[in-house]
């Protein structure tokens, strides 16, 4: 996702509609934590630590990890949870009946939202959010070692796949770290 597309997704106003609000929150969670779609869809309200801005994710191989999130996401989470009276043991992205939101429902919703906002959904749409998180984490000065921990990768090789930065990124970083630059 481009920076402009991310801004459109974040700024989108879903109104009071439950499904649209849930979709918006899902997009924000994916963009802010870099979690996998299955990790987001199985997230329970009690896994979100609002005081410390941390979320506990159940990753691949049933490995848990703790990932930070932004104050902006905290406000959205708090508003959504309180407006819908969600309980600590309930799924964050549940249906009105309390069952889990399906992956295809999420995919269809995100693709529709991209179209509504005026851009084509990226290939591997749901995974593109994770890739966008990873690339921007590095672009903004995050360490590849920290990124490995946040993404839940057991090897740095797996994280490296996300680190394909464009030449402009490399030039900007070099300008910041070069001994010859002012």
Image (cartoon, rainbow, N blue to C red):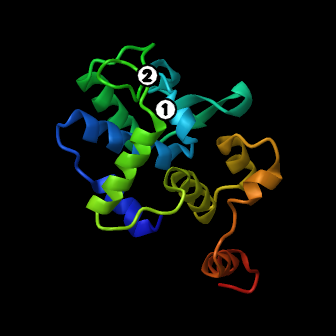
Horizontally, residue 130 falls left or right of residue 176, namely left
**Of pointers 2 and 1, the one earlier in the residue sequence:** 1
Q: How many marks?
A: 2
Residue lying at 27% horizontally and 53% vertically, measured from the top left: 12
Snapshot quadrant of residue 38: top right
Q: Provide residue 6's location: percent of width, then percent of height.
A: 41, 60
Q: Position of residue 159 (x, y in %)?
A: 74, 53
Question: What's the mark number on residue 107?
Answer: none
Q: In the rendered image, is residue 129 in sight?
A: yes
Q: Is 165 left or right of 28, judged from the image as shown?
A: right
Contact? badges 2 and 1 (CB < 8 Å): yes
Residue with the most extreme left position:
16
The quarter holding residue 85 reads top left
- Residue 122, given in percent of the width and then of the height, sits at 48, 63
Residue at 61% across, 55% down: 134
Q: Residue at x 29, y 67 (%)?
A: 118
- 39 or 174, nearer to the observer: 39
> How far apart in space, not on screen, are marks 2 and 1 (Cα)?
8 Å
Give the residue number, with chain letter if any, for mark 2.
91
The residue at 26%/41% (across/down) is 20
Compared with 87, 80 (above or below) is below
Please tell me whether residue 157 is drawn above or below residue 56 in the rendered image.
below
Image vertical order of residue 85 relative to residue 52, above or below: above
Relative to 16, 161 lies left or right: right
Q: Secondary structure at mark 1?
A: helix
Badge 2: few (under 14), some or many (20 or more) residues near its Cα, within 10 Å? many
**Residue 15 or residue 78, whichever sits in front:** 15
User: Does residue 77 appear to the left or right of 150 in the view shown?
Assistant: left
Image quarter where the C terminus lies is: bottom right
Which residue in the structure is indicated by mark 1? 41
Q: Position of residue 136 (x, y in %)?
A: 56, 61
């Amino acid at each position: 996702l481009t920076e402009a597309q991310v801004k459109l997704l974040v700024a989108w106003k879903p109104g009071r509609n439950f499904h649209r609000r849930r979709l918006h929150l899902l997009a924000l969670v994916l963009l802010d934590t870099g979690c996998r779609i299955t990790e987001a869809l199985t997230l329970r309200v009690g896994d979100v630590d609002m005081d410390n801005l941390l979320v506990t994710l159940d990753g691949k191989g049933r490995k848990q990890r703790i990932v930070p999130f932004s104050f902006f996401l905290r406000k959205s989470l708090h508003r959504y949870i309180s407006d819908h009276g969600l309980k600590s043991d309930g799924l964050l992205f549940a249906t009105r009946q309390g069952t889990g939101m399906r992956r295809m429902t999420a995919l269809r919703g995100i693709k529709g939202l991209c179209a509504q906002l005026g851009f084509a959904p990226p290939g591997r749409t749901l995974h593109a959010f994770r890739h966008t998180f990873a690339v921007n984490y590095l672009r903004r000065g995050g360490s590849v070692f920290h990124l490995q921990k946040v993404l839940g990768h057991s090897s740095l090789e797996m994280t490296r796949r996300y680190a394909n930065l464009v030449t402009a990124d490399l030039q900007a970083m070099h300008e910041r770290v070069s001994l010859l630059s002012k």
